[in-house]
Amino acid sequence: MSSVEDPANTSPSPYNLEASGGANQVRVRAYNERLVLSLVRRHGALSKADIARRTGLSAQTVSVIMRVLEKEGLLLRDEPVRGRVGQPSTPMRLNADAVLSFGVKIGRRSADLVLMDFVGTIRKQLHRTYAYPLPHEILDFVTHGIREIESSLSIAERRNIAGIGIAAPFELWSWAEEVGAPKGAMDVWRGFDLQIEIGARVPHAVYLQNDATSACGAELVFGVGARYPDFVYMFIGSFIGGGIVLNSSIFVGRTGTAGAIGPLPVRDRHGDTRQLLKIASIFVLENLLREQGIDPQPLWYSADDWIDFGPPLETWIQDTAEALAQAIVAAASIIDFSAAVIDGGFPDWVRRRVVEATIKAAAELDLQGVVMPEIVEGAVGTQARAIGGASLPIFARYLIDQNILFKEIDHAEAH
């Protein structure tokens, strides 16, 4: 599979591929192979004629590329489709088994490790909760977890592992007080290079990205991104974070923190101005439950299996919705997004209630002069950050273009 591991130096967005065009020169064969794989990934299955039409590559060039990709096991043939005229066309699709990738989500209350295949399906996953994250615990979880999962794989499956993508909050030591960590306990993260430390312990390439940006990337690739070319994304985890998609590409900004949204100033129910993250974050619900004498631990056991906490949950949902509505109006005042996408580390039924309440709260705001985006549920769900992390190695090695989809922190070669 060496033919797709050395891309051209420059390439257009993978999410405006029909307009990007291809090139027939031998020196950009690797780029053209990535272009074909990216198109097939986006559309599910395409014939040679479809790809030639969308890329501008010659039919002969497309035939050569697809034969190579099929021989390498990256593409599989579907059943021929018979049309009215001419020979039947044979769509090609990605071989889900051809590439596997590890994704790691590091949160302030829990960590997840997933093994994802070439089409974005989670094959295996592990979960760990903690009071607050510490480096040695994270290293232990990731390294032992990878060994555990790999021990259940065949030799062929282990050979197909593209790498490990880590989705983690930047500056993990920040807001330690809000999650109840002892004073100074999380300062150990200062100067700690998680990517290098994990890379020294595993035989795979390691990639690192901000957790909210990774979740946004997962939504763009595997969620509602096909329907909305521009959207502001909000992921409600222990702390709310987000991302911005413009022209079907993630916009990370000058420092890589564009769309963080957590620091946005909004008004709470008392009319006081506060940061969005201090209202619309799960740690706020955790503290609210404690105040009511309710054990908040079920929040972190499994993000998909929350219980209905009754009035405290409803209070948090309403407060969160009112704050999100203000944030969406602020975002729409700067860029006319087609959608505002809301997801989080909670069950679908909680997400649905948050979105419905946010739509209602937005309608009660002064919207004069604002073109409001459609407020919609995210489609990826609780594992969005881990899936986004697992996408990093796959895009780095096989698809177009990791520097546009995700601003890659580093590209460590596999041992």
Image (tube, rainbow, N blue to C red):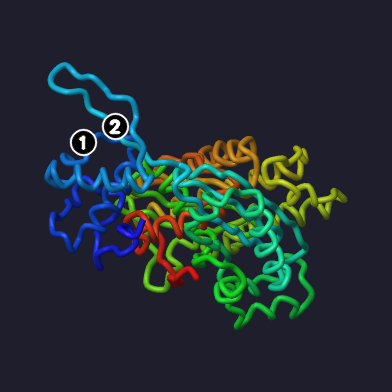
Residue at 30% of width from left, 64% of height from top? 6
Task: Check disc 2: other Cα within 10 Å, few if <14, some if 14-19, many if 20+.
Answer: many
Q: Residue 71 versus residue 8: which sits nearer the camera?
A: 71
The answer to whether residue 277 is seen in the rendering is: yes
Residue 386: x, y in percent? 56, 54
240 to the left or right of 4: right
**Secondary structure of the residue carrying numbered label 1:** helix
Q: Which residue is mark 1?
A: 50
332 to the left or right of 49: right
Residue 244: x, y in percent? 41, 56
The answer to whether residue 227 is seen in the rendering is: no
Q: Amino acid at mark 1?
A: Asp
Q: Quadrant of residue 146?
A: bottom right
**Secondary structure of the residue carrying numbered label 2:** loop
Q: Residue furthest bottom?
A: 191
Mark 1–mark 2 CB contact (< 8 Å): yes
* In this view, the mark in front (1 or 2): 2
Residue 125: x, y in percent? 64, 49
Q: Quadrant of the N terminus?
A: bottom left
Q: Along the polypeptide, which appears first: circle 1 or circle 2?
A: 1
Q: Residue 197 versus residue 323: which sits nearer the camera?
A: 197
Relative height, residue 223 to residue 129 (above, below):
above
Q: Which residue is mark 2?
A: 91
Q: Amino acid at mark 2?
A: Pro
323 to the left or right of 216: right
Task: Give the CA distance from mark 1 to mark 2.
Answer: 9 Å
Residue 279, label in figure: none
